[in-house]
Amino acid sequence: MKKYLYPSLLVLFVALVGLIVVFGKRKVALPFKERNQAISPASEWLNAKAAIEGLLSRIRTNPGDNKAKLNLALAYVQEGRVTGDHAHYDPAALKLLNEVLRKEPDNFEALCAKSVVYLSQHHFAEAIATANQARQISDYNAFVYGLLVDGYVELGEYPKAVAMAEKMMSIRPDIRSYARVSYLREIHGDYPGAIEAMDMAVKAGLPGLEQTAWVRTKLGELYEHTGALEKAEEQYHITLSERANYAYALAGLGRIEKARKRYTPAIRYFEQASKLVVDYAFADEMTDAYLLGNQPEAALESARSVIEELGGKEHLGSEEDGTGHYADRELAHAYLKTKELDLALKHARIEYERRPHNIDVNETLAWVHYKRGEFTEAAKYIDVARRTKSQNPVLLYRAGLIQLKNGSTDGGLALLRKALATNPYLPGTLTGEGKAYLATK
């Protein structure tokens, strides 16, 4: 599932693997999947296995060892990040963390790890509350401020996110803090500044580590957004030279091929990425490539696979023991591609009720209304989506189309042109209708 990879996950406390663990005579079966060894260096995998053996020995000797339980929970969080299988590992991690916190309610690391899991599951209000508990224990720790940045961004409380990022930078300027600064600059329309900060994040990382690969792919995406395909492509190739088979770099190359209208190789890249890491975004990208390549049946099948992966037509987010992943925004987009507009609106509204101030959520709801022909409603939400002055070309193009449908010809055309000036490689699935307007002026 897309994502669900926040800057807070860039550096975790440990790099371990999950196993089935026996706590004394009481068996607690925790899910473990053999890692696809193609996604990480062999030495990394072997070191993780060696580390877990020592951890298991401690747990068997002392079933009440909270430190060992905490490290095991962190192992599941790390496995979720490396494999992308958050739905599999996050609930197991959360159960262990709750065990630790029942005995040690002021355990700073456990609170931070629990906040990470909540972020992964899109429980943003809970993530903020938990991070603030940790902050009360230690208010001079960069990691906890990073958690707060992420939570506030996702709830659309951007001034608070900026304040937390400034605090984080003052404590420890490093790969994690630079990445957050970059994201906030991007949100506020400063692409040059965002690229500068993400480049600093890359330089602060060690080549070959997963977190360095992640920020380098984020740098590549920033170049994509600004139409600098060659620079983006270079970053993805560097990533793959430092960490072979990194799924997000492969997907980046797929987007480059798609932008160049080479849809067959684009699909191959997305398929390769899908075999390595669990992430709905790869199938979503494939859907667009099939559509652009005039393969509507394959596109529909791909879109339906996204819906199935995200949980089908049932509302995700069951909260037994605080678990359950929210994916309504992603489902809204998927249902748009299957032309199930009522379901798209249903899930967009659910997400909006959860976080009405987030600009991405407002953009999604605006676009659903646009596709339904509800242009006045679309205008209301797209205005909120633009409140941070974001220069994201997809957002600008959608805003332009919405303005045109509401009778603002000059303003709408200006936004279309600005979007294309920023990124002339916007996909035809978006730009097709706008070209008709541009051709008449």
Image (tube, rainbow, N blue to C red):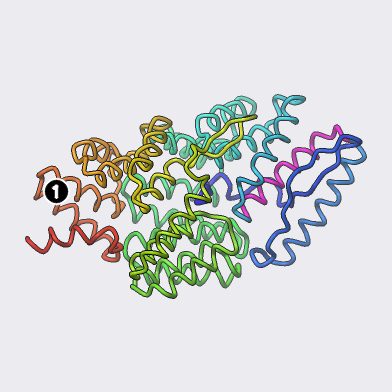
Q: Residue furthest front?
A: 297
Q: Nearer the viewer, residue 203 or 233?
A: 233
Q: Residue at x 57, y 59 (%)?
A: 212
Amino acid on which disc 1 is placed: Leu
Q: In the image, is residue 298 above or below residue 191?
A: below
Give the image location of residue 432, x and y in percent. 22, 61
Q: Nearer the viewer, residue 91 or 203?
A: 91
Circle 1 sits in a helix, a strand or a loop, which is it?
helix
Q: In the image, is residue 10 above or below residue 67?
A: below
Q: Main secondary structure of the magenta part?
A: helix
Q: In the image, is residue 323 above or below residue 20?
A: above
Query: With 18 as the anchor, is 300 left or right in this view?
Result: left
In which quadrant of the rendered image does the C terminus lie?
Answer: bottom left
Reading the image, the residue beneath label 1 is 404
Give the image location of residue 34, x and y in percent. 73, 58
Q: Residue at x 26, y 60 (%)?
A: 422
